[in-house]
Amino acid sequence: MSASATRLATSTCWRASQLGGMGLAYPRTWDSDCDKLRAAGCDVLFAPDEKALYPEPQTCKVHPDPALADLLEGHFRPGFFIGVCTVVMKLFSCVQPRVAVFGKKDYQQLMTIRHMVRQFALPIEIVGGETFRAADGLALSSRNGYLSESERAEAVQLSKTLQAMAMAAAVREGERDLAAIEARAMQTLTARGWQPDYLVLRRRADLLAPSAGEPLVALAAARLGSTRLIDNLEINAHLCHELQRHPRTVSREWADGYEAG
């Protein structure tokens, strides 16, 4: 976070058009959110209702670069990032922050907003916030509350599969090898009863297919029961070292199959 940020403001706004269809539901946890923001030292909560932020039909919209916004999440949720960029631009205009933090858990969203800010030369520093995880590794999300007890126990397999992909990618190079890792990941979750949309290895710069030696990120979106979960892992030497030090956190037999292949 930049030292120039002397006041912490949080913006919340919910609108159906931001959700990109797919029948996704998000819990409204106003009181809990306010308690957490107070504990975190938030100075201002800006939470306009839909009528205040959209006093008239929103006919002017921000259309992000389709090369980034129409793949992965944008493919499965058409128009999602148009809604995101439009509402974020409006929130920026209202709050006029110097620094804005967006979670890395929504990795493609973070990249899309960074690109929008750069394209419009907005005087805002975009910072990626690290993903908070439960003790077993599941990425925290309000949507986790929709999981049943048995689904919650199974949900950690999403992060474990990403870890296995990261370990396998660290020792294998080439387009065909990465494609095989992705296919294995899809098969693994499908066999466990998931409905995966994607489990992919992409280059961090633009989320396109990587060339050898480029920094990678593993990204996933999958339904468990009726709940759609997303997660990602940036692959680097430190991550692979930690996974090797703590093998209980990753499906070792999954990754070992690639190391021995």
Image (cartoon, rainbow, N blue to C red):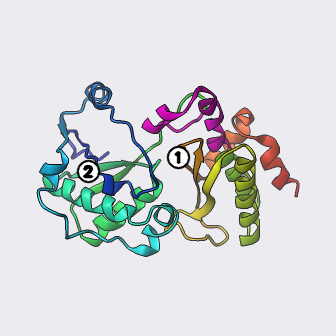
- Quadrant that contains the C terminus: bottom right
Residue type at tag 2 = Val
Q: Picture coordinates of residue 213 (x, y %)? A: 65, 67
Query: In x, y percent, where is residue 110?
Result: 40, 56
Q: Nearer the viewer, mark 1 or mark 2?
A: 1
* Magenta-colored stretch includes residue 152: yes
Range shown magenta: 137-160
Q: Is residue 186 left or right of residue 238?
A: right
Q: Residues within 10 Å of mark 2 (few under 14, many from 20)?
A: some
Q: Which mark is residue 99?
A: 2
Which residue shows up at 28% across the image and 47% down it?
A: 14
Residue 201: quadrant of the picture: bottom right
The one nearer the camera, 105 or 169, is: 105
| Looking at the image, residue 240 lies above or below residue 66 | above
Q: Residue at position x 19%, y 49% from top?
A: 50
Q: Give the mark count.
A: 2
Give yes or no for residue 260 being in the magenta stretch.
no
Residue at point 16%, 56% (across, down): 54
Q: In percent of the image, x 48 and y 36: which residue is there?
A: 140
Most common secondary structure along the magenta stretch: helix
Left-right relation of 2 to 261 = left
Q: Is residue 253 visible?
A: yes
**Left or right of 40 on screen, residue 211:** right
Residue corresponding to mark 1:
228
Query: In the displayed image of the protein, which residue is found farthest to the right?
Result: 260
Residue 225 in the image, given as x and y percentages of width and height: 59, 41
Element class at badge 2: strand
Is residue 95 visible in the rendered image? The answer is no
Pick the front one: 137 or 194: 194
The mark nearer the N terminus, 1 or 2, is 2
Residue 239: x, y in percent? 62, 46
